[in-house]
Structures are given as structure tokens and as C-alpha cells.
Amino acid sequence: MLKDFKKFVLRGNAVDLAVAVVIGAAFGSVVTALVRDILTPIIAAIAGKTDFSTLSFTIHGSKLLYGDVINALVSFLSIAAVIFFFVVQPINKMVTIANRRKGEPEKTTRECPECLSEIPKLASRCRHCTAKVKPED
């Protein structure tokens, strides 16, 4: 049983997942600090308030704290913006640049001159219309 546990723990998927969770947690704390220490003060300077949690209204004796919802919404939108602009966009840009450097992969198919269906480059007969075609090199 211990051998099976060791095999499970050292399996690639489990180790990769563990590393991703640890890095994700560390990255989450960096993003939270960025939002809390930089973006929230900027929003507070614009809105005039740093904390909306005290905002509420009462209906038939029930107190509704809509300020907490505003705080959570501002926090979520700030974190989503940081992730999008500082992580997703740069990674997408790097992937685009990397793909441009690779160039287009060589095509392995071509069109049949008779029926215009897609056939392998080295085919001597179309599988769709059975026309004889000259193989491409």
C-alpha cells in the first residue's frame, strides 16, 4: 500500500498540480497586495472613500449591508483587471511572438483538382472521387 501511495504522489500530474497550487497561492498574495496597496488607494482618491462596508439601508427592520457587496465587487474587478492586464495580455503577446517565429507548419494535404476535396500530398488517387492525381513532392 505504501508503494502505491509513493507511486501516486510522485506521478507527474499530482506533482504538477501541487506546484501549480503553491505558485497560484503565492501569486494570489502578490495580486491581493497590489490591489490592496496600490489600486484601492487610487479608487479611494477618485471615489472619496476607501471602505464601503458601512453603507447600508433598512427595510422593515432588516439591515442590508450593500457596502460589503460593493467592496467585494471592487476587489474582484480590481483583481480581474490586474490578472488580465499584467498576466493574460503579456502571455498572449509572448505566445503570438513565439508562434510568429516558428512560422507556418508545412501542409501535408492539398486539394483534388477534380472534386476539390482535401487529399494527402503524396496521394496518387483521390479517396472521394477516385480521380487519378499526380503526387506532389
Image (cartoon, rainbow, N blue to C red):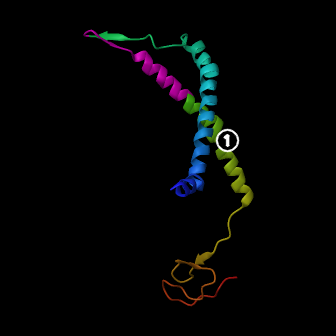
Q: Nearer the viewer, residue 123 or 42?
A: 42
Residue furthest bottom as drawn: 132
Magenta-span inclusion, residue 64:
yes
Image coords of residue 72 (percent x, y)? 47, 23
Q: Which residues are magenta?
A: 60-78
Q: Position of residue 127 (x, y in %)?
A: 51, 84
Label 1 crowding class (10 Å Cα cut-off): few <14, some 14-19, many 20+? few
Q: Position of residue 18 (x, y in %)?
A: 58, 45
Q: Indicate whether residue 63 is drawn in magenta.
A: yes
Determine the image quadrant of residue 78: top right
Compare residues 71 and 4 and report the one nearer the observer. Answer: 4
At a point 67% along the width and 41% down the height, the residue shown is 90
x and y, in percent, of residue 124 in the image: 60, 88
Residue 111 is left or right of residue 58, and the answer is right
The vertical placement of 117 against 99, above or below, is below
Which residue is located at x 60 percent, y 54 percent? Answer: 10
Residue 65 appears in which quarter of the rendering? top left
Can you identify the residue that label 1 sits on?
A: 90
